[in-house]
Amino acid sequence: MSAAPRRLLLVSACALVDADRRILLAQRPQGKSMAGLWEFPGGKVEAGETPEETLVRELDEELGIRTKVACLAPLTFASHAYPEFHLLMPVFVCRRYEGVPQGREGQALKWVRAAALRDYPMPPADEPLIPILQDLL
């Protein structure tokens, strides 16, 4: 007998890269699931949005920075089965944006070199992205 079907959650994420080739990580704030873990900025894809449009919106809402769909380069995706849902997460790289990222939702931010990404505990879906980013940067 197979397990009960889990809902599919579509989330879009961004490896935001600065001029020094560092990647921005955001720490999940207290009160959220997986609080304290570090992740790539992004969020849930809303009805009628593309994953790219989601990132343009989320980067503005969460970090106060502006970018355009044309500045998002598809990199890879994550597919991970959590107990409550199955996460499908397209991941994009963004090197062109305006503004200085700030944690507008209470999250801590940290610019991290690709080689040091494993020093930051991440949600299980994000961990397989580390070697891809290390190869890229």
Image: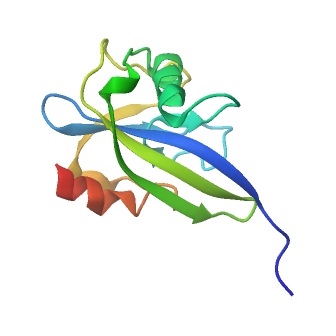
Query: Residue 85: image x %, image y %?
Result: 72, 58
Query: Residue 42: image x %, image y %?
Result: 50, 35
- For the point 52% across and 21% down, the residue is 57
Report whether 26 appears left or right of 118.
right
Query: Residue 125: image x %, image y %?
Result: 51, 59
Q: Quadrant of residue 39?
A: top left
- For the point 39% across and 16% down, the residue is 65
Which residue occupies the extreme left position in the image? 20
Residue 21 higher or lower than 71, as above or below: below
Report whether 35 appears left or right of 40.
right
Query: Which part of the image, by quadrant, shows the N terminus?
Result: bottom right
Which residue occupies the extreme bottom position in the image? 1
Residue 47 higher or lower than 32, as above or below: above
Residue 137 appears in the figure: yes
- For the point 31% across and 12% down, the residue is 99
Query: Residue 137: image x %, image y %?
Result: 16, 49
Snapshot colouring: rainbow
Seen from the viewer's position, the closer of residues 98 and 27 is 98
Residue 115 appears in the figure: no
- For the point 46% across and 41% down, the residue is 13
